[in-house]
Amino acid sequence: MIHSLTGAVELGFMYALMALGVYITYRILDFPDLTVDASFTTGAGIAAVMISHGQAPWLATLAAFGGGLAAGICTGLLHTKGKVNGLLAGIIMMIALYSINIRIMGKPNISLLNTDTLFSGVASHEWHDFRLAYIVVLFAVAIVVKLLLDAFLHTDLGLALRATGDNKRMIRSFGSNTDLTTILGVSLSNGLVALSGALIAQDGGSADISMGIGMIVIGLASVIIGEAMLGPKRVFWATLAVVVGSLAYRIVFALALRAEFLHLKATDLKLITAVIVILALVIPTMSRSAKQKQQAKRRTAELAAGMRGKGAI
Amino acid sequence: MLEIYQVSKLFNPGTADEKIALMDINLKLNEGDFVTVIGSNGAGKSTLMNIISGVMQPDIGDVRIDGQSVASKSESERSRWVGRVFQDPMAGTAPNMTIEENLSMAYARGKPRGFGWAVTGRKRALFKEELKRLGIGLDARLRAKVGLLSGGERQALSLLMSTFTRPGILLLDEHTAALDPARAELITRLTEEIVRSMKLTTLMVTHNMEQAIRLGNRLIMMDKGRIILDIPPERKQDLTVQKLLGEFERISGHKLADDRVVLG
Ligand SMILES: Nc1ncnc2c1ncn2[C@@H]1O[C@H](COP(=O)(O)OP(=O)(O)OP(=O)(O)O)[C@@H](O)[C@H]1O
Ligand SMILES: [Mg+2]
């Protein structure tokens, strides 16, 4: 039990980088970018190929980040300069990347067992049994990336990026080229997603061509769950919510698999994810409209009472 | 300062919907001119603003700022010279960002945007000073999200944002039209104060005849894509709403038809 939970926490921190990437496109740019499903694999593939060819793991991880940035630039260009609808631009890039990923990897699956990865140093640590050091390192990675992202979002360029999703017309009238900020955002997003893929491949000991499928929905689930837990607030809290959401998603999922009476299989993951996202999307809307109805009722009753009162005088 | 030279613009050329939005417009604004613009619906006023700011390109003709053609410059490049306030109070500010963040984006107009902190202590002090000038208490709400402000407050903020960096040209397109009369009056007063104290070269579209006469040193009238009347400072002083409407009918041959017209 404890073991599957610590595993969930570790995954939660690694996938948090992917979720932060999704947050940039989905929440900041208001652009649901499906490239994520393939750029995750791109990151994993680049890291796995380089490491298995004897490159330094940190270099491989950095290259994976770069690969994601490049993939994001392509989607961004397609969307802004090519004027292709955002969803479609993402789907097209996703398909294109599938072939590119196979080319990068050379085969559908690369094993990293018995190879030194970023985490080899930590895993051989004497605390290995408790996996505490491992969790601490992954926690630190997620938090550092989150803080760097926060800092970036408070720079002049970061503000222009946020305004691009908030009010394009306004930021353009103040001299920002929104095509460039959009490309920057989509690129950064996919860079983080690929980085996350590189970590997951090194942690799991392999990169697989299909490992990114459904990633966008998991990312959305993390963003939405986090918001439901912490509420959408200032940048600092919003990105923290994404990390928390990613953790919560992994923990809930691990518990659901452990609950034997549910008879769930690992392959049910995608269905559960979809259900979580549906609930997270539908419940707030429904409760909002219920609240509005209630308020309208109360207010109308008040007004009606007021009118009756006046009539009496 | 601003020269519009033989500018014409057609919409949907060659189709059944072909529409002449601007036809051979020539206009020259001197440094410090405050020109009010009136005209019927569809006269081409907004199109003229959009062509100056680079949102649209003219089919023929040229726009020059400070003697230099800006034809090849995009909207974002022209923003170095051109400040704008839109009719829609929602259009000029980013609702999910704070007042100080919005001001900071305006402050960066014409500068490269890099990795420097957007809001620093020094900038915050400056923003506070500027907001105080509006006199509506926004200086105490630097960290409030702009989406929480009323339409009038947002429009006052937009006006400040588009002027405090002293743009060469200020374009106001019916920027009080969406506000209730009291708030519209406040924004008009602020506009007058700011334009006067900063000596901004301004082009202001308004549907309020009284305002068009009272504000500024020059008045132009547009109809069907043309400038039909350009009233210079010396003649503007003894203008009345009646005379203005009479003049419009005499030249254009029809009544001024503006669904938002306010006579004053
Ligand atoms: N994007 C567009 N596509 C097609 N026609 C347009 C477009 N924009 C404006 N027009 C047409 O061009 C003409 C000029 O429009 P414009 O918006 O400049 O008028 P206006 O003087 O600002 O009018 P109003 O007082 O209603 O704001 C109108 O006939 C309008 O229908
Ligand atoms: Mg108009």
Image: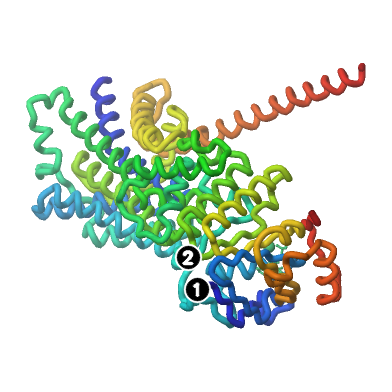
User: At which x and y percent is residue B217?
Assistant: 65, 65
Tell me which numbered mark, 1 or 2, is placed earlier along the sequence. Answer: 1
Kindly indicate the quadrant of the structure image that contains residue A128: top left
Q: Indicate left or right for B176 with A208 as reference.
A: right
| Residue that carries the numbered disc 2 in the rendered image | B81
Report the amino acid beneath label 1.
Ile
Q: Which mark is residue B45?
A: none
Check the picture and name the quadrant holding the N terminus of chain A.
top left
| Residue that carries the numbered disc 1 in the rendered image | B65
Quadrant of the rendered image holding ligand 2: bottom right
Kindly indicate the quadrant of the structure image that contains residue A6: top left
Q: Secondary structure at mark 2?
A: loop
Would residue A239 be visible to someone looking at this image? yes
Tag 2 subunit: B
User: At which x and y percent is residue A187?
Assistant: 34, 55
Verify CB contact (< 8 Å) between mark 1 and mark 2.
Answer: yes
